[in-house]
Amino acid sequence: MKYMEESRLARINELYKKSQNEGLTAEEKQEQANLRSEYIQAVRNNLRGTLNNISILNPDGSVTELTKKNKQ
């Protein structure tokens, strides 16, 4: 699984705070959009990885593996 670097998360927060206080330049808006997109993709990949590793414990004690779906 791919996680987003702390420095990139800090930059997302920095740009958000700047947008609330003084506004962003066109370049900063584009950077913010790119970082947000990257963050959303990282969250989706993390969730997909978690869901792909779920097993169901049946009442009889047996374990059923869920089928993996890799959406591209």
Image (cartoon, grey):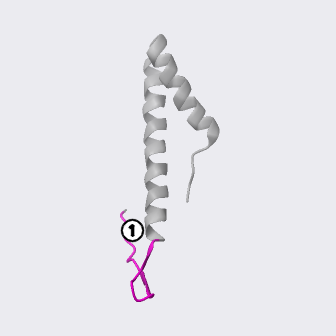
Residue 15, percent from left and from top? 51, 24
Residue 63 in the magenta stretch? The answer is yes
Q: Which residue is mark 1?
A: 70
The reply to whether residue 70 is visible in this rendering is yes
Mark 1 element type = loop
Question: Which sits in the foreground, 64 or 31?
Answer: 64
The quadrant in which residue 37 appears is top left
Residue 57 position in % (x across, y down): 43, 80
Q: Position of residue 41 (x, y in %)?
A: 44, 49
Residue at 43% in and 65% down: 51
Closest to the observer, 71 or 47: 47
Crowd band around label 1 with a 10 angstrom C-alpha radius: few (<14), some (14–19), many (20+): few
Q: Residue at x 39, y 77 (%)?
A: 66
Locate residue 8, reporting x and y percent: 58, 37
Relative height, residue 36 to residue 46 (above, below) = above
Quadrant of the image occupied by residue 64: bottom left
Q: Is residue 24 above or below residue 6?
A: above
Relative height, residue 47 to residue 4 (above, below): below
Main secondary structure type of the part rendered in magenta: loop
Q: Residue at x 55, y 24 (%)?
A: 14
Quadrant of the rendered image containing residue 1: bottom right
- Residue 24, magenta (yes or no): no
* Span colored in magenta: 54-71
Q: Relative to 65, is 25 above or below? A: above
Q: Residue furthest top?
A: 22
Q: Amino acid at mark 1?
A: Asn
Instruction: Please tell me which residue is depicted at 43% across the width and 20% down the height of the picture.
Output: 26
Q: Quadrant of the C terminus?
A: bottom left
Q: Judge by depth and name the residue closer to the eye, 63 or 28.
A: 63
